[in-house]
């Protein structure tokens, strides 16, 4: 999923705002009752709705690559980094992918095997050479379904590189169930690859009703990866809403994957599903 955001001038912190109050009072002379009430109201609003300062650009890497977040609330632990590395190994055919010092994706020890997708390798190499990607852990988020990307800055001032954050809800993947073929076609690495395609090629997801029958620009490229891995292809972008029965209080989100196989000289379409309980995944 795609969201775009351009950096603006940082908002003042609550303490900077508080520090400006005495100056404002002195300029206006003796405080009136209405002015005091306005100040008190401003203080209450600052306590209830503190201003979130913009992220400092100096915390972002200056070179291209895929990096673990440096912000403690969003930093991925080693187990989650290893899950990404293992999935990328299966997809690309590179063995030895790892996060150096738990900080950045490293290929210096990787070697190519006879498996893997050439398209997936090309996507990851393009990102490693031309983009700054920050991975963030947003597990148990009410806003993120599996993963989402956000453009943090048009370009890094020092490196002239575009910067993106990829937010991952690892807990969502625990709720997936379905055919093994569909689960393999919608694993962590392929979901992340979808987000990397957004960053690398500026492709968009389909809007509105079109996504019910069209996988979209990003998934078209990810489907090429699936084909090279002999996995079924994603048939649509938006998930279907499924209610098992009229008496059920639980509904599911579902994605359909398809594969065409030949039997007796005739094509036969095989359908696979992956689904998840809607209350546990915000999608």
Image: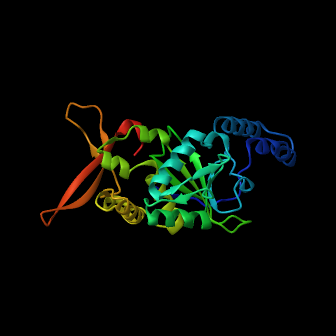
**Which residue occupies the foreground of this view, 282 or 168?**
168
**Which residue occupies the foreground of this view, 203 or 84?**
84
Residue drawn at (69%, 39%) of the image: 46
Q: Please state the horizontal and vertical placement of residue 153, each as a whole percent of the image.
A: 63, 61
Task: Kindly tell me whether residue 252 is visible in this rendering.
Answer: yes
**Which residue occupies the foreground of this view, 247 or 186?**
186
Q: How is the structure coloured here?
A: rainbow
Residue extending furthest left?
Answer: 264
Residue drawn at (34%, 54%) of the image: 238
**Which residue occupies the foreground of this view, 11 or 6?**
6
Task: Kindly tell me whether residue 254 is visible in this rendering.
Answer: no
Q: Please state the horizontal and vertical placement of residue 207, each as a whole percent of the image.
A: 38, 61
Tell me: residue 234, above or below residue 47: below
Q: Please state the horizontal and vertical placement of residue 77, each as a whole percent of the image.
A: 60, 40
Residue drawn at (39%, 46%) of the image: 283
From the viewer's perspective, tell me whether residue 127 is left or right of residue 238: right
Q: Please state the horizontal and vertical placement of residue 63, each as a whole percent of the image.
A: 69, 62
Tell me: residue 142, above or below residue 57: above
Number of numbered discs overlaid on the protein picture: 0
From the viewer's perspective, tell me whether residue 122 is left or right of residue 105: left
Quadrant of res 17: top right
Tell me: residue 205, above or below residue 38: below
Residue drawn at (38%, 50%) of the image: 186
């Amino acid at each position: 999923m795609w969201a775009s955001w351009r950096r603006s001038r940082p908002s003042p912190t609550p303490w900077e705002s508080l520090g400006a109050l005495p100056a404002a009072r002195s300029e206006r002379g003796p405080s009136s009752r209405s002015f005091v009430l306005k100040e008190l109201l401003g203080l209450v609003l600052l306590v209830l709705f503190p201003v979130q300062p913009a992220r400092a650009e100096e915390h972002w890497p200056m070179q291209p690559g895929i990096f673990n977040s440096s912000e403690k609330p969003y930093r991925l632990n080693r187990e989650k980094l290893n899950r990404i590395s293992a999935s990328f190994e299966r997809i690309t055919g590179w063995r030895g992918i790892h996060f150096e010092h738990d900080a950045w994706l490293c290929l210096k020890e990787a070697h190519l095997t006879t498996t893997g997708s050439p398209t997936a390798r090309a996507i990851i190499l393009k990102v490693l050479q031309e983009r700054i990607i920050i991975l963030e852990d947003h597990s148990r988020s009410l806003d993120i379904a599996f993963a989402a990307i956000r453009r943090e800055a048009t370009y890094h001032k020092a490196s002239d590189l575009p910067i993106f954050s990829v937010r991952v809800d690892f807990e969502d993947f625990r709720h997936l169930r379905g055919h093994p073929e569909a689960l393999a076609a919608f694993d962590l690495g392929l979901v992340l690859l979808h987000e990397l395609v957004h960053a690398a090629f500026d492709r968009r997801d389909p809007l509105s009703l079109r996504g019910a029958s069209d996988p979209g620009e990003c998934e078209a490229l990810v489907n090429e990866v699936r084909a090279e891995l002999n996995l079924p292809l994603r048939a649509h972008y938006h998930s279907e809403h499924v209610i098992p029965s009229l008496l059920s209080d639980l509904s599911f989100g579902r994605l359909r994957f398809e594969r065409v196989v030949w039997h007796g000289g005739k094509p036969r379409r095989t359908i696979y599903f992956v689904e998840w309980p809607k209350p546990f995944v915000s999608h």
